[in-house]
Amino acid sequence: MKYLIALLFLISSAFLFAQKDDDGGFVGFKSNAKPNPKGKTNIFKVGIIPFFEGQIYGTGELRFNYERVIAKQQSILVGISYVFPNLLGLALYSSGASGGRGSTGGTTGYGSTPGFLDANYAFEGVRGMLGYRYYLMKRRGAPYGIYVGPYLSYNFVNVSQKAAPQNYEGLNYFDACAVFGVQAVSSKHFVFDFTTGLGYKDNFISNPNSNMELSPQTINIPPFDHVKFLIQLNFGYGL
C-alpha cells in the first residue's frame, strides 16, 4: 500500500507541476508552456549497464525506457525491464560451479554462495520504473541538458526450485530516489543519458515460509540497509 501511495503521489505531483502559471510566479514547475517545436518530444532508450549486471546480484536486465516531454522544461519517464541470469549467471548455470544451495544443501542464503545461480534453481522477474524530470536549461528546455527530479523503481524476481516449482521465494527491491543527470541529443537524433542519485530502498523477501530460506542479509547490507545509490547509463533515439 505504501508503494502504491508513493507512486500515486509522484504521478499527481508531475501533473500538478505542469498546470498553468496563473499567478506569475516561478516559471518552470507551474508552467504548461508547449515544448520547443524544433525539439524532440519522444525519447526511446535502452540501458547498457544492466544487461551485464542488474540491480540484483547475478541478474541482468533487458531494459527499455520511454521519455515524453510534457512541457517546456518537464518530462515523464517510464521504463520496464525483463530480469534474467546475466552472463556470469549463465556461465555458472552451465558449469554448475556456483557452490550454492543446490549443491551444498545449505540454507544460509546466497550472499557469498549464490544458490539461485545453481543449475537446480530457476529465476526470472520484471522491473518497473517511473520518473519525473525538470530540465534546468530554460533556453532549450526538455529533453536537453541537466535535469533533476524524483524516480521510483520496483524490481521483483521469483526464485524457484526446478524439481519442485512449488518451492519458491520472491526478491523484492523497491527504491525511491532524488536524481541528477544530463542528457545530450545529437542533430542525428541519437541520445546519451547519464543519471545518478541518492534515496531510500526497501528490499525484502516474499513468501518467506517456503523451503528455500533465502537470507535477508543478502538484500540489505548493514550499515546501509535503506540507502540507495543510483547510477544509470542509457542510449537511445529521439523523435
Image (cartoon, grey):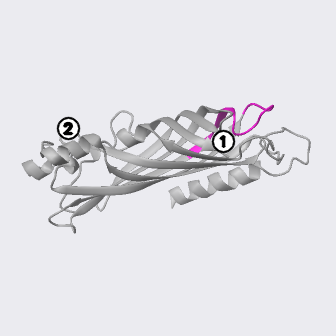
Instruction: Identify the residue under disc 2.
Output: 112
Q: Which mark is residue 133?
A: 1
Query: Helix or strand or loop: what does disc 2 sit on?
Result: loop
What residue occupies the far front of the structure in this picture? 188
Vertical relation: 78 (above or below) 178: below
For this view, does 201 lie left or right of residue 218?
A: right
Q: Which residue is painted at 82% across and 47% down in the image?
A: 34
3D distance between C-alphas at marks 2 and 1 = 38 Å
Tell me, yes or no, whether the two marked residues, 2 and 1, touch with CB atoms within 8 Å.
no
Front one among 188 and 62: 188
Q: Position of residue 126 (x, y in %)?
A: 41, 56
First to last magenta residue range: 136-151
Q: Earlier in the sequence, mark 2 or mark 1?
A: 2
Q: Quadrant of residue 217?
A: top left
Front one among 134 and 141: 141
Q: In the image, what residue type sits under mark 2?
A: Ser
For this view, does 181 lie left or right of residue 93?
A: right
Query: Helix or strand or loop: what does disc 1 sit on?
Result: strand
